[in-house]
Amino acid sequence: SPRLWPEVNLARRCAPQLASALLGTAAYQELLFPGGSMEMTLPVYEDAVISRFYNDCLVAAVDSIVACLPDGRLLSVVEIGAGTGGTASSVLPRLQGVCLQYMFTDVSETFLNQAQRRFAEYAGFMRFEL
């Protein structure tokens, strides 16, 4: 099924090197993010069947919360371990105009830098923190 291609493509890239990655003779980061690119992993977090399902559930929850907000009340959101931004890309459009602050956090400065560029249109209410 074409809906499974994100996982299939990532498995094709990583599976042959699994033993080396587990033994520490191959850098897992390079397998997942070749040359620092998110091209292989981003579709897994945004387009894969299971990711799409959970992100859609989260969007529905955000929509419900926003619908219950009193007039003039704004949200503050913290996403812990935001990584590639798969979740943020789903919820940020729903939060525009109703979010005082969206804090995008991760342990990787590379992810934060890429997210700042990717989500520049939301710069008015986004923060990026290690």
Image (cartoon, rainbow, N blue to C red):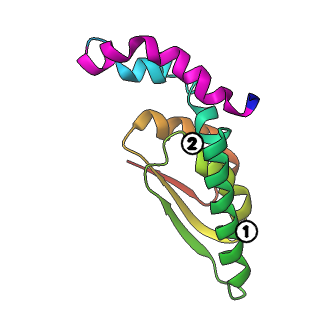
As for residue 48 lying within the magenta part, the answer is no
Question: Residue 27, percent across and down?
Answer: 34, 17
Q: Quadrant of residue 47?
A: top right
Q: Which residue is painted at 69% across and 75% down in the image?
A: 64
Q: Which residue is painted at 56% across and 30% down in the image?
A: 41
Q: Is residue 82 left or right of residue 44?
A: left
- Disc 2 secondary structure class: helix
Question: Residue 42, percent across and down?
Answer: 60, 33
Query: Is residue 10 visible to us here?
Result: yes
As for residue 4 lying within the magenta part, the answer is yes
Q: Earlier in the sequence, mark 2 or mark 1?
A: 1
Q: Which residues are magenta?
A: 3-24
Main secondary structure type of the part rendered in magenta: helix
Circle 1 packing at 10 Å, graded few (<14), some (14-19), many (20+), is few
Q: Amino acid at mark 2?
A: Gln
Q: CA distance from mark 2 to mark 1?
A: 19 Å
Q: Which residue is mark 2?
A: 116
